Image (cartoon, helix red, strand yellow):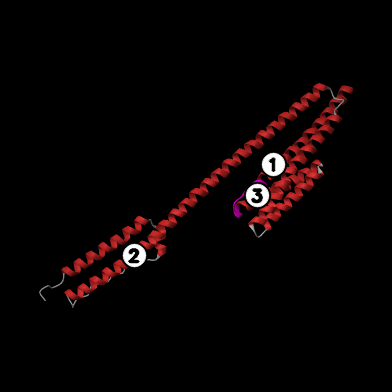
Amino acid sequence: MMKKISLILFLSCFVLQINAQDLYEDALTAASYAYSHSKKAHGANNVYHTQEYADKAIEAFEQVEDLADQCGCEKANETAYAAKEDMVSSLQQDTYERSRFFAKRAKDLGSKLLEELTFCQANADTDVYADQASIEENEIAEVAEEVSMKQQELEAKRHQLEIEQQKLEQQIAEQNRKKAEFEARRAAEFKEQSLIKSKAELALKKLESALQELSVVLNDESRFEAQADYLRSENELKNESLDDTKSFYVNRAKELTQTAMQQFASYNMEN
């Protein structure tokens, strides 16, 4: 009978311990993310990244606030709330420096939050083990071993998530770098295209005027027909490369010259 009662007590305490451990581990994991995102929000060098990490930190602090309440860890609950409010304030500031000020406060509270949760967890563990003092030593050892294994698994998962997050952030940073380089090259190329357009159209216009004047000089009864099909808007340059722009004006110069040669060939040189 006593063995059955001992087993029931053991199982009851074991379930309570596992549930408490799950809550604390979830709270510590969320607190780790909140602290990590707070550091990144504080260290960000632009408003976009500050807001991105601040949003993630707020979400994590809210999770810790709820989990700490379930665990009965009042100090951690209050600290998580204060950190969340500071991070919300960071998003509401109108200057970069003030935003970083509140982000730093939230980061400092995030570090304090981890200490408070660890302290609460240690005290909770002490209480649980005190209640199990009457359980056989072998049973306690098995429970402790399973809890330790679960903690190691959770730590491994958290570490893996951090690695994956770092890889994703590196990929995003590389994509942004390549995008910025492409936009810079395209801007420089477009500037050169615009310059070529301006000079080429002016030169073609002068050439066309010269051919018109020459046409009158050679045959006052004939007029060189102006084309003016080389005039373009800058929007048309956006969909082509620098080489395409050069080729366009080269071809127009050839066409203009060929048109002039054909028209001059038809003149009656006897008149």
Q: Amino acid at mark 3?
A: His
Distance in Å between CA atoms under marks 3 and 2: 50 Å
Relative vertical location of residue 213 with respect to residue 18 in this rendering, above or below? below
Q: Position of residue 90 (x, y in %)?
A: 68, 54
The circle on residue 42 is 3
Q: Specify the segment rendered in magenta.
A: 38-48
Distance in Å between CA atoms under marks 1 and 3: 15 Å
Whether residue 77 sits left or right of residue 248 in the image: it is: right
Element type where label 1 sits in the image: helix
Distance in Å between CA atoms under marks 2 and 1: 61 Å
Q: Is residue 28 magenta?
A: no
The circle on residue 199 is 2
Q: Position of residue 83 (x, y in %)?
A: 73, 49
- Looking at the image, is mark 1 or mark 3 nearer the viewer? 3
Q: Main secondary structure of the magenta part?
A: helix
Element type where label 3 sits in the image: helix
Asked whether the viewer can see residue 149, the reply is yes
Q: Which residue is mark 1?
A: 32
Q: How many marks?
A: 3
Asked whether the viewer can see residue 1, the reply is no
For this rendering, which residue is in front, 219 or 75? Answer: 75
